[in-house]
Amino acid sequence: MDKPSKPEVDLAASCACGAISVSVRGRILAMLLCSCLDCQKATGTGHSAVALAAPATVTITGETRSFVRPADSGALFTRRFCPTCGTPIAGSSSRAPEAIMLPVGLFGADTEWFVPNQLIFARSHHDWDAMAEGLPRYIRYRDSGEI
Ligand SMILES: [Zn+2]
Ligand SMILES: [Zn+2]
């Protein structure tokens, strides 16, 4: 049976040092991979793996630090991370306040629900970063055209 594209989850995770806890209880809104240059810098690899969830379904406990930068779109993009161990905790865009972006690796082994259905910012994707054959790729966002 196909896995749902908007799975219902009940997840708990913490950063590498344990200072920050994250729980997600509710429906995942979207699942994607992003190879924008900012995600490459933030993850140290070729792309980020992201699940979007409504803010009301996400609880973050502990003192995070934030880094805010302007995105290409003109929106402000905020990344929250643990100030001690540097684990990425969450991201958000001023353009889409109804969604929190969760770095899927945060949830460790408990990610069988994650089935990304698109690669965004494929314009900066590198060939050395292997991708599933047939995954839809978009130059920027999904509405900006397929490549
Ligand atoms: Zn930490
Ligand atoms: Zn990105």
Image (cartoon, rainbow, N blue to C red):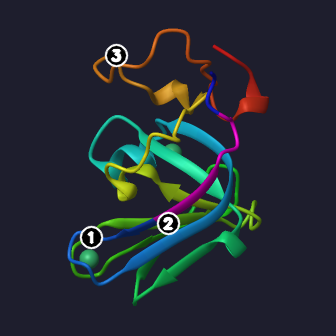
Q: How crowded is mark 1: few (under 14 residues within 10 Å), some or many (20 or more)?
A: some
* Residue 7 lies in the magenta stretch: yes
Q: Give the range drawn in magenta.
A: 4-11
Residue for point 61% across, 67% down: 25
Q: Given the image, on which type of amino acid does mark 2 rest?
A: Ala
Residue 91 drawn at (x, y percent): 54, 64
Q: Are marks 1 and 2 in contact (CB under 8 Å)?
A: no
Identify the mark nearer the N-term, 2 or 3.
Answer: 2
Q: Which of 110 and 83 is in front in this view?
A: 110
Identify the mark nearer the N-term, 1 or 3.
Answer: 1
Query: Residues under labels 2 and 3: Cα distance?
Result: 27 Å
Residue for point 50% across, 72% down: 23
Q: Is mark 2 within 8 Å of ligand 1?
A: no
Instruction: Read off the residue under disc 1.
Output: 86
Residue 68 visible somewhere in the drawing: no
Q: In which quarter of the image is residue 83?
A: bottom left
Vertical arrangement, residue 48 with respect to residue 1, above or below:
below
Which label is found at residue 127? 3
Q: Is mark 1 within 8 Å of ligand 1?
A: yes
Q: Nearer the viewer, residue 68 or 91?
A: 91
* SS type, badge 2: strand
* Residue 138 lies in the magenta stretch: no
Query: Residues under labels 1 and 2: Cα distance?
Result: 12 Å
Which label is found at residue 145? none
Quarter of the figure with the C terminus: top right
Q: Given the image, on which type of amino acid does mark 1 rest?
A: Gly
Q: Which of marks 1 and 3 is in front?
A: 1
Q: Nearer the viewer, mark 2 or mark 3?
A: 2
Instruction: Read off the residue under disc 2.
Output: 90
